[in-house]
């Protein structure tokens, strides 16, 4: 379809969805604009941060007991507790900020530590799938790895959708045993 035709279809679909929503019905999502989102759960990094925080609190407590500091006021105690609370909040941030993989018609998108990253089909060299792992190799840049063990991704569902994505966009798809 040409782009003008796609814009017209999107505009008409939007109008139909608004009228359906007013009537209390479900909206229509055309196949071309469908985005499948696969969510994982990050639990390893928050666990490491909490262990680090516990170790920091333990070592600080032992150090304060072993060597009492003269003139140590409530200022350093409050800064100590603020530091511990900030580490716990950081662990909570990483736990509740779930990693995901969006697969659309001509691009894929994911969340990295530096922010959301989008990769068009032309930028993908190969998609490799193993039991519990999905690896998307880029033409330029590092590979994206999605793991059932590390981030609790539904790799079986992702495999089926990425296979269809690779077939539509002529990207090499490799299944390894």
Image (cartoon, helix red, strand yellow):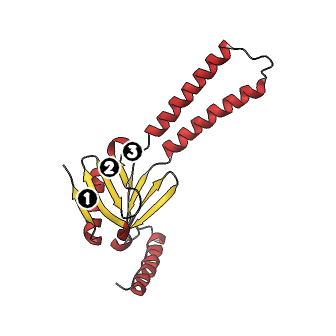
Question: Pointer 3: what residue?
Answer: 151
| Label 3 SS | helix
Q: In the image, 152: left or right of 56?
A: left
Question: Which numbered tag is attached to residue 160?
Answer: 1
Q: Residues within 10 Å of mark 1 (few under 14, many from 20)?
A: few
Judged from this view, the residue extending furthest toward the left is 177
Viewer-proximal residue, 20 or 124?
124
Judged from this view, the residue extending furthest toward the front is 140
Question: Pointer 2: what residue?
Answer: 154
- Mark before the other along the chain sequence, 1 or 3: 3
The Cα–Cα distance between marks 3 and 2, rounded to whole angstroms, is 9 Å
Question: What residue is shown at x 56% (from left), y 30% (from top)?
Answer: 53
| Label 1 SS | helix
Viewer-proximal residue, 54 or 22?
54
Question: What residue is shown at x 67% (from left), y 17% (from top)?
Answer: 64
Question: What residue is shown at x 27% (from left), y 71% (from top)?
Answer: 170
Q: In the image, 38: left or right of 176?
A: right
- Mark before the other along the chain sequence, 1 or 2: 2
Question: Which numbered tag is attached to residue 152?
Answer: none
Viewer-proximal residue, 53 or 99?
53
């Amino acid at each position: 379809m040409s782009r003008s035709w796609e814009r017209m279809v999107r505009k008409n679909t939007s109008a139909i969805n608004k009228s359906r929503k007013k009537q209390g019905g479900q909206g229509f999502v055309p196949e071309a604009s469908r985005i499948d989102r696969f969510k994982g759960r990050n639990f390893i990094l928050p666990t490491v941060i909490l262990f680090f925080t516990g170790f920091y609190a333990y070592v600080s407590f032992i150090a304060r007991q072993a060597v009492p500091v003269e003139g140590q006021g409530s200022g350093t105690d409050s800064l100590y507790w603020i530091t511990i609370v900030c580490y716990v909040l950081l662990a909570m941030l990483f736990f509740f900020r779930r990693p995901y993989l969006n697969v659309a018609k001509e691009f894929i998108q994911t969340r990295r530590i530096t922010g959301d990253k989008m990769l068009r089909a032309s930028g993908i060299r190969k998609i490799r799938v193993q039991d519990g792992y999905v690896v998307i190799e880029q033409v330029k840049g590092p590979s994206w790895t999605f793991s059932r063990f590390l981030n609790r991704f539904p790799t079986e569902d992702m495999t089926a959708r990425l296979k269809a994505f690779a077939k539509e966009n002529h990207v090499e798809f490799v299944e390894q045993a």
